[in-house]
Amino acid sequence: MRFPSERVEAAVTFDEFFEEEHERLYKALYFVTGNRHDAEELMQDAFLRLWERWDRIDHIHDLTGYLFRVALNGFRTRRRRALTAVRKMAPAEEARDMFLDAEMRADVRQLLLRLTPRQRAALQLVDLLGYPSEQAARVLRVRPSTVRALATQGRRAIRATEGDRDA
């Protein structure tokens, strides 16, 4: 076994180095990733990069350290890419303005208070709670057509009020 600070002798072949280091690198990567498949893939990528530079190993002071650094850099790169992909798939939730929410609730409340109690009840059941007109009719003890008519009248009254406010 070689210590990390030892210099690799030119007589060592890539195959010998692989046999000597692959198990240690795999265990270290498995510890870091927690996944056998990822550890093996990162190990293979690191050895491939080393093999591509094998003709210049005399310029690398600590071959084992270089191998581990390449493998861990590969892990960090994959992790960054995964985080970027997650951010793109699930955009961050915008911070809500509590004052704007309170203002909006006050506006909606004012609009609803201008309706008749029956129109307000029909709108709340159908539009806010999502009840079908048949179910809302059972709650209000009227016919489904009456619920639809009350909701339509309420919406029309709100649109008219909003039109007056915008003018």
Image (spheres, rainbow, N blue to C red):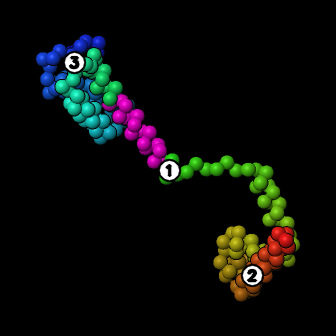
Residue 81's spot in the image, x, y percent? 42, 42
Numbered tag placed on residue 58 in the rendering: 3
In-image side of 78 versus 126 (left or right): left
Q: Amino acid at mark 2?
A: Thr
Mark 1, mark 3: which one is toward the viewer? 3
Numbered tag placed on residue 152 in the rendering: 2
Name the element at disc 3.
helix
Which residue corresponds to the image point at 29% horizontal and 12% vertical from the top-left? 5
Q: CA distance from mark 1 to mark 3?
A: 43 Å
Q: Which residue is mark 1?
A: 88
Which residue corresponds to the image point at 68% horizontal and 80% vertical from the top-left? 133
Check the image and report above or below for 99 versus 79: below
Name the element at disc 1.
helix
First along the sequence among labels 2 and 3: 3
Closer to the camera in the image, 89 or 114: 89
Closer to the camera in the image, 126 or 85: 85
Check the image and report above or below for 101 versus 51: below
Check the image and report above or below for 48 versus 83: above
Q: Amino acid at mark 3?
A: Asp
Residue 145's spot in the image, x, y percent? 71, 87
Q: Amino acid at mark 1?
A: Lys
Q: CA distance from mark 1 to mark 2?
A: 40 Å
Which residue corresponds to the image point at 31% horizontal and 25% vertical from the top-left? 68
Residues rendered magenta in the picture? 71-86
Mark 2, mark 3: which one is toward the viewer? 3
Name the element at disc 2.
helix
Numbered tag placed on residue 18 in the rendering: none
Q: Quadrant where the N terminus lies?
A: top left
Does the image show residue 141?
A: no
